[in-house]
Amino acid sequence: MNAVHAAAAATPPSVTFLVIAYRMRATIGEAVHAALAQTHPCEIIVSDDSSGDGTLDAARAALAGHPRASQVVLRSTGRNLGLCAHMCELAQIARGEILVCSSGDDISYPHRVQALVDAFAANPQAQLVGSAVDDVDAQGKLLAAKTRGLPQRLDQRWFLRRGKLVTVLGASMALRRGLLVGLPPLQGTVEDNMLSLRAALLGDCLCLQQALLAYRRHGGNLNDWMFDRSGNDYATYERRHRRVIAMYRDIAADQRRCVDARPDLPQQRKALGLELASMYELEAQMREAVLDRPRSQWIAPLWRGLRHPGLRRKSAERALKLLLPRRWFGATTRIRN
């Protein structure tokens, strides 16, 4: 029996490489070629979220004449779903135990899948493995090497203490399929935080220190849209914060749904999961108070934030705003995300 278990543990998990695209006609070809260049065998699914801009045709052209083209699943959603629902749909289609995610505007290095599979094999409890990335511009020119990385191992307590509410970069993620098909569907706009917290709830969340892909920075990045800093005025400031408030509430609700869905988990993991959900909700409440409420009503959420190890810096920065007119917000200060 031990020999059987040892043999099973030595068998690499099956992998599906997901190229996930929306309005990425100019870059999807490079992303597809990068998927085909992987040194580790994997199922490849290229999926366009009903872009309507020629992305699907560009992906088809990139596959034309390639000797492995017939092995690639090229598809489109029936209607535009948004990233989270798109990922959930793909998880139902994929056959791999491990899902390696790639945006249609990023370039995975040939050894990326192999490095991720090795990490899963070496860490059987790992639910999600991300990595550092190389930031590149729209034309692929290097902007910053080996960036956006986090410590090698991330657990619930680290996320509670971190302070910036930062998790593994979604563009760098590989995850066990069960994070999507074995838990309630993702609901929201941005996947990074929800999936990282799901992984920490169920097992281990890892971030490899080497850069495994070129992460393209341009005006269409979801992250740049969410944390919009295109103007130094109150309108931009308010728009950014309302988007982030909604995102943080989505994250809190997702973590609570996942805790409720897994009553079998150790009590401590469930308690920490609910504490993480409360932290994200408190951060949303503080941002909302600054935008909408009389200053006398800022005090309670700010005080709660000052008492929370992960929110102290943000809360202290917001406390300074008690002295400033709202119209100055965005022009004179920068609350880091």
Image (cartoon, rainbow, N blue to C red):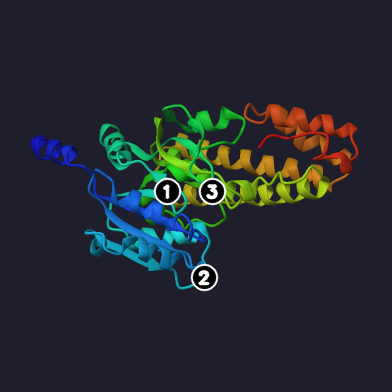
**Residue assigned mark 3:** 256
* C-beta proximity under 8 Å, tags 1 and 2: no
Identified by mark 2, the residue type is Gly
Identified by mark 1, the residue type is Arg
User: Where 204 sits versus 217, above or below?
Assistant: above
Residue visible at 79% across and 33% down in the picture: 333
Q: Answer with left or right where residue 311 lies relative to residue 47.
A: right
Q: CA distance from mark 1 to mark 2?
A: 39 Å
Q: CA distance from mark 3 to mark 1?
A: 10 Å
**Residue assigned mark 1:** 262
Task: Say which element carries label 1.
Answer: loop
Identified by mark 3, the residue type is Arg
**Image quadrant occupied by the N terminus:** top left
**Residue assigned mark 2:** 52
Mark toward the start of the polypeptide (3 vs 2): 2
Farthest residue in the bottom direction? Answer: 78
Q: CA distance from mark 3 to mark 2?
A: 35 Å
Task: Name the foreground residue: 287 vs 309.
Answer: 287
